[in-house]
Image: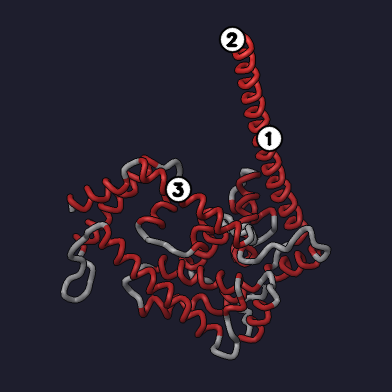
Amino acid sequence: MSDEQLSHSMLKKLAQTPDYFAWYLWQYQQNENLSHSDVANFLHASSEQMEALSMCKVPDSQQPHFPKQLKAVADFAGVNHFPLAMLIRKVEAARALQRESTTTVTSIMAAREKDNSSQESSKKDECTDEQ
Amino acid sequence: MKKNQTWTNEELIDKLVQHDATALRCLYEVHAKDLLNYFILRYNSLSKEEISDAITDALIKLVDNPAAFKPGSSSLKTYLIRDIKGDILNTLAKIQRAKKKLSVVELSDDDGNIKEESTNEVKDLELKVQNFLAKILDNERDIQLAWMMEIDRERATSEFVRVLQKTQLPPAEQKAEVKKHKDRIKKRLNRNGWEDFLKKLKQNV
């Protein structure tokens, strides 16, 4: 049984670290507007199992061994690996969408700036021609 | 995971070296509570939270860089105790530096205990600094970064990386990100009279 303060300190730190399940569980909770116990119910996990899972690293979903590695972590923590796989996919999809929308906004702003500066330089040319 | 499951030193080292996804949890299960008890007994001027943070940092650091531990030289527990002790001594030194910077003069009584009124004085000064930073910086994260830079005099890039949530970047990019944010915050502090604010604070103490 872990000391509460110690556990709190560890989970708080890991919730800021994208390598760990603590981060993924927190992101899922935020994205889906759920409470911590809602997420635990989704994974059919007790609080002790959630704590154990939170301290495990998330396997790389792009690697071929991902299903085997995920099952190993799920078995270690004592949780069901099917909803866990779904949770990982949802969080990664949301993260990819966020990156894409940031890139789109940056591209639009860059295009606008380029547009404005070319309009300004053509106005300057007109003034010079008139003179 | 079975209840009360434990792992030998060799099994833990193997998990670390293999970058096993469960390494941190296993290390935590085997060593964390003993480490907490060890340090609480020996460093009672620090809070349980500060000691827990130091233990957490050491465990995560070891999992991130298992090559730092040489199996022949000591046991995992001894290595962790040494690492955490170093961290705790740095924290105690930072606290002393922060108190000097905020010009708190007399802190302890004859028995070496922090006087209650001095503790309140430090808290009052810390609140003034927090309020100043909150006025000139946009968010909690920047306030935390400014505190680390100017009050804690934090040198470790890894600490800033953690606050910025950039651990997934390669080391060179992490360094660049940290520099970018530190430069930005430093400019903001200079533009808003940070040095003058500190001078006034010292004069009023």
Q: Residue at x 64, y 31 (%)?
A: A109
**What's the amino acid at mark 2?**
Gln
Chain containing the residue with disc 1: A
Does label 1 or label 2 sit earlier along the sequence? 1
Q: Residue at x 33, y 45 (%)?
A: B131
The coloring applied to the image is: secondary structure
Q: Residue at x 51, y 72 (%)?
A: B58
When the figure is inspected, residue B141 is found, relative to residue A9, above or below; the finding is above
From the image, tell me which residue sits under label 1: A107
**Residue B119 percent coordinates (x, y):** 24, 61
Of helix, strand and loop, which one carries label 1?
helix
When the figure is inspected, residue B116 is found, relative to residue A92, above or below; the finding is below
Mark yes or no: residue A1 visible: no
From the image, tell me which residue sits under label 3: B142
From the image, tell me which residue sits under label 2: A131
Q: Quadrant of the C terminus of chain A?
A: top right
**Residue A9 percent coordinates (x, y):** 49, 63
- Residue A41, by quadrant, is bottom right
Rate crowding at label 3 as few (under 14), some (14 to 19) or many (20 or more) other CA atoms within 10 Å.
many
Q: CA distance from mark 1 to mark 2?
A: 37 Å
Chain containing the residue with disc 3: B
